[in-house]
Image: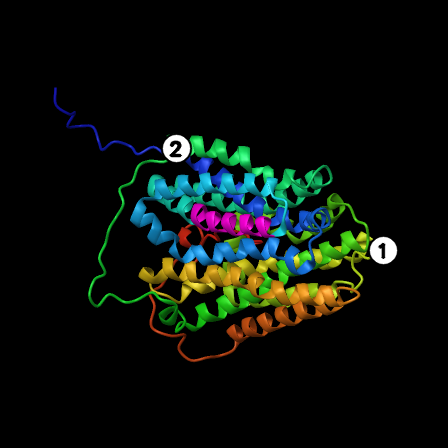
Amino acid sequence: MGPDPVAGPAVRRTPWALVCVLAATMLVDALEVSAAVVSAPVVGDALALAPAVLFWLVGGFAAGFAAVLPWAAALGRRFGRRRVQLVALAVFALASAASAAADSGGWLILGRVVKGACVALTAPTGLAIILAAVPDGPDRRRAVSGYALCGTAGFCGGLLLAGLLTGVDWRLVPALPVPAALLLLVLAARLVPHDPPVRQRARPGRPSAGPRVLWRYRPLRRAALTAAAFNGAYVVLLLVTAWQAHHRGGWTPSRTALVFLPAAAPAALTALWSARIAVRLGPDRSAAAGAVLAVVGCLLVPRDAGAAGSGAAGLLPATAVLGLAFLLAFTALHLQAVDAVPEELRPAATAFYQTCVQAGPVLLTAPAAALVTAGADIGPAVWLVTAVAAAGALVAVTGLLPSGPPGPPSTPRPRSLHDDPSVVPYVRDGGR
């Protein structure tokens, strides 16, 4: 019997189980970003690590992420997204297990670099798999929103879990992702569809999407510089204050995590509406306001924050302001970054922007560690972080000034994360 001529085309169902597995992978990725900030001081004590080494537990992750992210899309095309996702998950689990067993700072840093590289593959590849598997429409918007929500919620969860587990044994923190990653690997192997590798040859005359070309777009350049300064100041400030709270104030990891929670909670609570907030205020105004508030947050940090005799109340205003700054700035900066470029350059612009985001902590880690080592308190390191945040704010404010053409002509883009999922931040990190 032939097909029913009256019946319409088959309805494409949304693979919600696949979406849940990929979103859970994003959650585990984001947990990894923030957990090291809380656990690092205790790890330093256990392995007798100097700040110059200890701070690279955070900077190493950012370095691995920034180094591999620009190649993520090309690797997905060359070897297939399914293969890239599964291999990256497996290596992430192995690196987590090795980190939990490490007995030196060098091995721990190497593990963090490898895990950062794995997250740079799983986060964008997972999003690409969702976009390919979920039909366009309301279901895709829900799937992408849930994926982004897991990233921001994971940062908060990483703070809290690290606070609890570090108090028991710091090795539980790097070991925590191992069973989760292995379970997700098994589920992903069953659910992620096969996709054939695509081997494309460069087309003559096709425009290059290298950094030199992207750098010509002024709004992208402004957003990348601001985000690098913002994220570098944000991450390193938390790391510096966590170090002093532990070493000179005797704070428990759980106490540090609770004091840091306001710096992450606003972005997590509003993740589903962050794009609407940025669009309602205007990406330029929202980014500038957030960048300026970041400077205010840095200035509110007491130079003896976390030291003996100082209470949590002295640091809470600063972390609360930083949380509001992140809410206003980060999604707006991402919208700025992709708004100025043509459609065909947006994937490259997103990777370039996210690489700059991670470059901030990488570049700021070493000088901050040197200042902490040399000084009697964290004052000089906090002033360095404040100066970097202020430089980023100055760059962001230039977006409010009248200017000439933004760069080469671009095509209009939808101003919503739901309409253009390519602007979903890969990692909070934090960014986050």
The residue positioned 85% from the left and 55% from the top of the image is: 308
Asked which quadrant contains residue 85, the reply is top left
Q: CA distance from mark 1 to mark 2?
A: 51 Å
Q: Where is residue 132, by image quadrant?
A: top left
Main secondary-structure element of the magenta-colored stretch: helix
Say which label, 1 or 2, has the lower sequence index.
2
Q: Amino acid at mark 1?
A: Ala
In this rendering, the answer to whether 349 lies above or below 269 is: below
Q: Start and end of the magenta stretch?
A: 106-123
Amino acid carrying label 2: it is: Ala
As drawn, the residue found furthest toward the top would be 1
Disc sitting over residue 308 in the figure: 1
Find out whether residue 121 is within the magenta segment: yes
Asked if residue 8 can be seen in this view, the reply is: yes
**SS type, badge 1:** loop
Does residue 263 belong to the magenta stretch?
A: no
Task: Provide the residue designation for mark 2.
Answer: 189
Query: Circles 1 and 2: CB distance less than 8 Å?
Result: no
